[in-house]
Image (cartoon, helix red, strand yellow):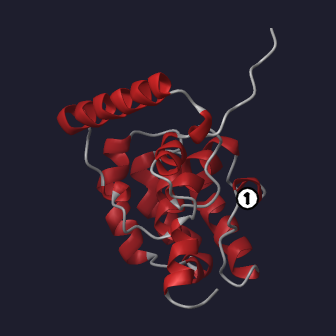
Amino acid sequence: MLRQPVRALHEISSDVAQRISWLRRRLLCWFARNGRSFPWREATRTPYEVVVAEILLQRTTAVAVARTYIGFLKRYPSWIVLAQAPLEGLENLLRPLGLWRQKAQAFQRLAQSIEMNSGVVPDARKELERLPGIGPYTASRAAPRCQYDPPPGSVSRTTREHRGETQTRAARTRSSSGKE
């Protein structure tokens, strides 16, 4: 079966645009009634906090991560602190989540890798995937939330494009602070 080429939002029919709008309203209403609130979903989270959440969420429940997340960020507030943390302390904090030894080692390898890159988290999904402990799924989950490189067709990207927004949050921040 041949796939139809993806069209830009301004090229879609008004009927399709109305259906997208209807679906968006339905999803937002559903989430308002049924969605769960977790600290890593706050819009003010930094790329570090988003990536930490996504790694913590690997192979465990959101409820379990919610009990650990804030304490983790207080104890390890940055990549540099995490990179230099004693492995035993990190393992003890992660123990309730299971796979604590593997997660602790993965966190340290990731933090050390990012610190070797001057503390900069890559700004594209494919670059995120090259980091230790970040696979395609985690990169796809983290990238749109960090406003990096949303996957084609992601709800956040489609919604931004539908509203006429083309810049990422990082680009808007740079241009508003005069750092272009």
Q: Which residue is mark 1?
A: 132
At which x and y percent is residue 46?
46, 71
Classify 112 as above or below 103: below
Q: Which residue appears at 70% of the width and 31% of the height?
A: 6
Q: Check disc 1 and report its element: helix, strand or loop.
A: loop
Q: Quadrant of residue 109?
A: bottom right
Classify 110 as above or below 136: below
Q: Quadrant of residue 1?
A: top right
Classify 171 as above or below 133: below
Q: Which residue appears at 62% of the width and 77% of the height?
A: 83
Q: Is residue 81 visible?
A: no
At which x and y percent is residue 145?
50, 56
**Which residue sits furthest left?**
33
- The residue closer to the viewer here, 144 or 58, is 144
At which x and y percent is residue 162?
48, 45
- The residue closer to the viewer here, 96 or 7, is 7
Q: Which residue appears at 65% of the width and 41% of the height?
A: 152
Is residue 105 rendered to the left or right of residue 45?
A: right
**Which residue sits furthest bottom?**
178
